[in-house]
Image: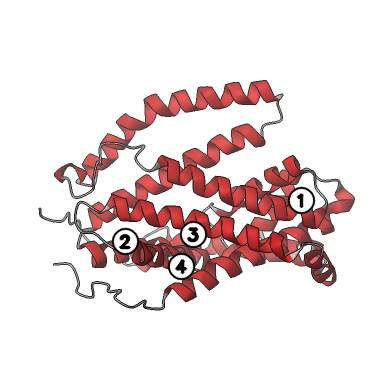
Amino acid sequence: MKPLEVAAPAPAAARPLYWVRVSFTVLVCLLAWAWLLRHAQFDALGAQAAQVPAWGWLAAGAALLAGHSLRAVRLQRDWRHLAHVRWWECLRLVLTHNAMVLMLPLRAGEAAYLMAVRRQWGVGWGAAGIALLRWRLQDMAVLGMLAVLLLLPLPLWQRLAGAVLAAGALHFLLPPVWRWLARRAGGGSGAVGEVADPWKGLAVSAGNWSLKVLANGCLLAALAGLPLLDAWRAALGGELAGVQPLQPPAGLGTYEGGVWLAAGAAPDAVGLVVSAALAVHAFSLAVALGAAAVAQLRLPGSKLREESPS
């Protein structure tokens, strides 16, 4: 089976909107950092962090790593029709990709997935891109459903009804849109397993984001004294702010702003909530980047393909 190939993307500087996006990203970065420096109570961070017992941090870290582990299983299954790759190696690729997305602006780190899949499984740009697109569409669907359930200012039964209606709309609207995207990317040749199914792997996206919101929400509840449901809303707000494309490095400032907006806390509690959000954000980054660094270690018998795809 011949890997899919499409023309390599033009250099970033050659794209007409590139510098516009860079300028807006710098502006967002400056505004987010100015807001963060104004409201964060850095002297209270240590005291807040000490309120959480060690087992609480460990449990939250385990939940975050479990989400990455699920994604590694998905990566392994997405490409198993081409070659079997050990779960540990898939986890290394997932963690490296995640670290690059976190640290590079304009979500440029997404290219790490494309390059890793091309090198490991020998597929073309089209196949790698359509697989990544499916991941991100499902992430958007899951975050949207969680937003309907947690963030809409409606009674619970209305939020549940809205989630059901949204799920029904996605069920009918996404498949034809997905088939059109797959055809444009050349997915019909079969290099991407089960490319016609836009829902393949959805459970992994749901599990990953649910674990992340639950873990970070529990930490926010402990650090800021928020009710648990409000803390989960706040954690979801941070994640929604963190997936928009105009990001400062590591999402610093935008994540905290999303937490504060979704928490619905009183104006006099801004400093407490923002400081707690900063602590949770720093912890999440430490887990993600630390795990990515550890994953670079080669276990006995592990081997990655080094040759470039032809």
Q: Residue at x 23, y 75 (%)?
A: 306
Q: Residue at x 29, y 76 (%)?
A: 301
Compare residues 184 and 198 and report the one nearer the observer: 198
Q: Which residue is mark 1?
A: 221
- CB under 8 Å between callouts 1 and 3? no
3D distance between C-alphas at marks 3 and 2: 22 Å
The residue type indicated by label 4 comes to Met
Q: How many numbered callouts?
A: 4
Under circle 4, the secondary element is helix
Q: Residue at x 21, y 45 (%)?
A: 187
Query: Which quadrant holds the C terminus?
Result: bottom left
Task: Say which label, 4 or 3, has the lower sequence index.
Answer: 3
Left or right: where 261 falls relative to 113: right
Q: Which residue is mark 3?
A: 21
The residue type indicated by label 2 comes to Leu
User: Which label number is shown at residue 100?
Assistant: 4
The residue type indicated by label 1 comes to Ala
Task: Say which label, 3 or 2, has the lower sequence index.
Answer: 3
Task: Say which label, 1 or 3, has the lower sequence index.
Answer: 3
Q: Quadrant of residue 5?
A: bottom left
The residue type indicated by label 3 comes to Arg
Residue 297, horizontal then vertical, whole percent: 41, 78
Residue 156, horizontal then vertical, whole percent: 69, 25
Residue 211, horizontal then vertical, whole percent: 57, 49
Q: Which residue is mark 2?
A: 114
